[in-house]
Amino acid sequence: MGIGSLAIAALQRTLVSRTITLRLLRAGIIALWATGICLPPALARLTTGAETKASSTRVIAQPTTSRAARAEGIRSLPLDRLQPEVRAKVSEVVSKATVYRRAPVLVTDCHPQMYQFLIRNPEVMVNIWDVMGISNVKIKRTSNTTFRAADGHGTRCTIEFLHGDREKQLIYAQGYYEGPLFTKPVRAQCVLLLRSGFVRETSGRYYVTGQLDTFIKVDHVALALLTKTFQPLVGKAADVNFTESVTFLGRVSRTAEANPQGLKRLAARLENVQAEVRTQFIEVSDLVAQHAEQRVAAQRAAYERQPPADRPAGNAPRR
């Protein structure tokens, strides 16, 4: 084999290894709403009225891999809430992580109840994507806090919600990639810390802030080296996926406001979701719609109390 052929073969292996690295990263990101496939704006099929803009998600802090961010992320882990054996496996990944990254800190227009429900029930999101024909990701709930997932391209993982409250979600995932380049599956472990904040404006509309710290440990020396080499590319892919996922959550919430009946019809088609979870989804959607109606009614009443000359230009408030 000539030098040129060897160079091409090396390049092909490098590119495929980068793909595998990205897929292993998906095994971690899949743990958060089973993302990893870029999200087309297909949810626009459900939206109506004023809520048709492409995105209401804003970046308020740029992504980082700095030591300071890593140290702060480690200090923020709710290790004191974990059992000793669980704390040990989290510490193993965090202390020996091949890759650390803090995704961009995002603010999106989303009702807190919908946001938290979809995070804690990722199978709902995945089944929505399946119904809409925009994803091959599959996920199955195996207990109240555990899931099995696959991306349809050789990556599989198990997901465990270790801790969850209003402000923090701690998730542990074990994943592997199985493909033609390796005689044995390439494995990785991932710890995800999602921190959220909620603000209600004087208008009554809610905004959610999301900050995601990711620690990934790859159990393959050569691939771990490649992962570090390609970290900027891998990180950008993860940032895009996180941003699209948060944006999608906001769209689901706004759809519950603008087209609640359409969202109920969609919920009825979620055949890969347990009946009680599907019922909870409908209940949360109803709650979001009710809050939107109350908010708009209050705004309309305030608008109509003003003298006509003092009313702001434009139509009366609406959802």
Image (cartoon, rainbow, N blue to C red):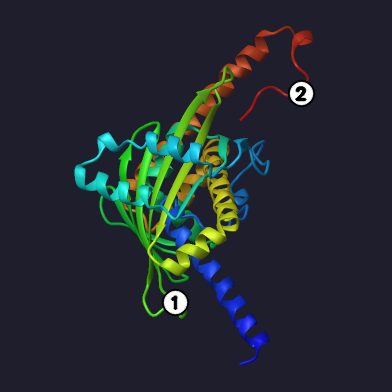
Check the picture and name the quadrant holding the C terminus. top right
Quadrant of the rendered image containing residue 49: top right
Q: How far is the residue under mark 2 from the one under mark 1?
A: 58 Å
Q: Is residue 22 visible?
A: no
Q: Nearer the viewer, residue 75 or 197?
A: 75
Query: Which numbered circle lies on residue 11?
Result: none
Q: Could you say where residue 96 lies in the image, as x and y percent from the top left?
A: 37, 52
On screen, residue 110 above or below 19? above
Circle 1 Cα neighbour tier, 10 Å, few/some/many (<14 / 14–19 / ≥20): some
Q: Tag 1 or tag 2, which sits nearer the N-term?
A: 1
Mark 1, secondary structure of its residue: loop
**Which amino acid, by three-letter code, is at mark 2?**
Gly
Mark 2, secondary structure of its residue: loop
Circle 2 Cα neighbour tier, 10 Å, few/some/many (<14 / 14–19 / ≥20): few
On screen, residue 85 above or below 315? below
Q: Tell me if 174 is positioned left or right of 247 in this view.
A: left
Q: Residue at x 37, y 73 (%)?
A: 185
Residue beneath disc 1: 179
Q: Could you say where residue 92 lies in the image, as x and y percent from the top left?
A: 31, 51
**Which amino acid, by three-letter code, is at mark 1?**
Gly
Residue beneath disc 2: 314
Q: Residue at x 69, y 8 (%)?
A: 306
Q: Could you say where residue 241 lies in the image, as x and y percent from the top left?
A: 55, 52
Q: Nearer the viewer, residue 228 or 35?
A: 228
Q: Residue at x 51, y 32 (%)?
A: 208
Q: Tell me if 72 is positioned left or right of 229 in this view.
A: left
Q: Is residue 120 visible?
A: yes
Q: Residue at x 67, y 13 (%)?
A: 304
